[in-house]
Image (cartoon, rainbow, N blue to C red):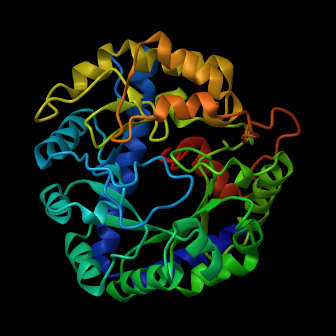
Amino acid sequence: MSEYTSLLKICWRVFRQTPLRLLWKFCWNFCWPNLWNMRHFEQRQQRGEPFFPAFNMISVTEACNLACSGCWVSQGGHKHLTTAQIDGIIRESKRHGSRFFGILGGEPLLYKGLIDLFLHHSDCYFQLFTNGTLLTDDVAQQLRRAGNVTPLISIEGLEEESDRRRQGNEVYQRTLRGVRACRKAGLIFGVAASICKGNYDELVTRQHIERVAREGAAYLWYYIYRPVGETPHPEQALTAEQIRGLRQFLVHERLNAPVALIDVYWDDEGQAICPGATGMSHHVSPSGALEFCPAIQMATDFLNADASNMTQLYAHSQFLAGMRHQIAQATRGCIIMENPQLMAKIIQGYEARETTTRGTAMEEYHKMTKIPGHNMNTNLIPEQSRPYRWLKKHYFFGFGAYG
């Protein structure tokens, strides 16, 4: 079966299980606006105009109902954005042509009024990063009413591994109930997996791809585990051989997978990507800080009460401009994994402030040691799937929440 036949089958399955209104919202709010937005962003960069990222990832709250190892969010954290700030972030982004937003936490479904914001900004499209345990039938129906949201549900392993990683009971089954609520509501949704040593053999398999397809997901998004936060567990980090194996697996399976397989790590030629270093994507933390990426919880620039200063902050942030330049000079890959000491040195050079509740992020960075990242330098593995290769080259949709 050719990659084109596989893509058509995926599209046909999504078409059959999704209401026409939601399909229209996906095409009108997501596909065409983002193609235009990427071109506009590239033109701004080429002309040397004031900087504004192509996409903003928004962590609306630190609160979470789970306590996952390797998560950068403060356990028991209490910081959150106000609705006025979130509304302002979206409004300022739309001024620059950006209408797609990743909504993160903590667990964003704990944020009151979130679905009202989706409804209010009906001309935008939102990717909701969630552990799925709060995705009840009622919540899924509310998301269907909004029509402009794609839940991305995190599954970190099967039964035993999910409980271990997420420090809970029956997490896998609770998450599956959220997956099935999305399918029942006819939502376009995806499943995510952060791959570590503990779940590699369970999730980097054809069986897992087919399992996700049977549950009705339109896409499966693979991340690489990064040991950060209060409980980093660096022993779970992938080896260089496993990272290369993951890349080879994705490239091969994309040729005939029954779901769209997405990664945020490599371009069409197999070169490593850091969306933050390219300026494609930055992150707004629950404290209102403009951060390089979600896992680097330091900043010098903070939103005001209604985020009306966002454009000016991005245009004049020496910290973000310096991070983009210096990290791009150091690596095409992930600075957190490849050189955390250099990362800490760059941050300290700008006297950036910590943005977390726990107040120990810089201490954590100093304790980190180098581990393999996704920058393979030589013997690159280019995309074999021609549709995905085109998308990676012309319409990059790994928007960098975890990349």
Nearest the eye: 294 or 365 = 365
Q: Please indicate, yes or no, whether residue 192 appears anywhere in the rendered image.
A: no
Counting from the top left corner in percent of width and height, residue 86 is at: 19, 45
Where 259 sits versus 98, above or below?
below
Counting from the top left corner in percent of width and height, residue 45 is at: 44, 21
Nearest the eye: 117 or 79 = 79
* Quarter residue 257 falls in: bottom right
Counting from the top left corner in percent of width and height, residue 271 is at: 72, 37
Where 395 sits versus 257, above or below?
above
Which corner quadrant holds the C terminus? Answer: top right
Nearest the eye: 356 or 334 = 356
Where 228 sits versus 144, above or below?
above
Q: Please indicate, yes or no, whether residue 298 appears anywhere in the rendered image.
A: yes
- Horizontally, residue 298 falls left or right of residue 394, namely left
Counting from the top left corner in percent of width and height, residue 44 is at: 39, 22
Q: Residue at x 42, y 66 (%)?
A: 66
